[in-house]
Amino acid sequence: MTNRFVLDSHAVLAYLQDEPGADIVQGLLDRARRGETTVLCSCVNAAEVYWATRRHHGAHLAERAWAALCQLPVTLVPADERVACEAGEIKAGHSLALGDAFAAATARLQDAEVVTGDPEFAALETLVPILWLGEPPTGSPR
């Protein structure tokens, strides 16, 4: 197990909306506040949080979600050329959303574990370590 974690948009939304798995994210954030771990999020996944919140709840709540994310002990990782190429390579070899590829790429390049409840990540368990919010999907190698 690593001491660095990458939150995908599923994990951030679970935390912000107090959904299942929010307690796991809260524990990581508490550890990050104490300097015991590092919590990261790709800028692409942060954009997904904004987009999903705006789409389902409107601009006002999207702005509140963004402000809340910016107050958390989470480092936003830019989607630079290195991350973009890694995400492209991951996406080319797996059937998953582009944002998920960015979360996985960020985790690989930062030697971190992805935090998610998104079943699409089951296909990446041999590529990147995953901390599941809840039970791993059926058929997951764990």
Image: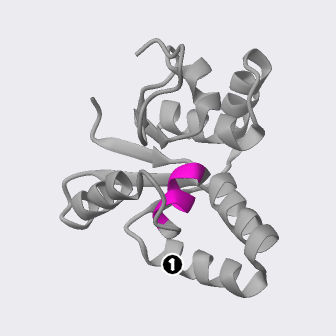
In this view of the protein, which residue sits in the foreground, 42 or 25?
25
- From the top left corner, tell me how far across and down residue 62 is, in percent: 69, 78
Q: Residue at x 43, y 63 (%)?
A: 74
Figure quadrant of residue 85: top right
How packed mark 1 is, by other alpha carbons closer than 10 Å (few <14, some 14-19, many 20 or more), is few
Q: Specify the segment rendered in magenta.
A: 10-15
**Main secondary-structure element of the magenta-colored stretch:** helix
- From the top left corner, tell me how far across and down residue 123 is, in percent: 61, 19
Q: Is residue 133 above or below residue 26?
A: above
- From the top left corner, tell me how far across and down residue 2 is, in percent: 29, 34
Disc 1 marks which residue? 68
Left of 122 or right of it: where is 47? right
Q: Residue at x 51, y 78 (%)?
A: 68
- From the top left corner, tell me how far across and down residue 127 is, in percent: 53, 18
Q: Residue at x 33, y 61 (%)?
A: 26
Q: Residue at x 25, y 63 (%)?
A: 30
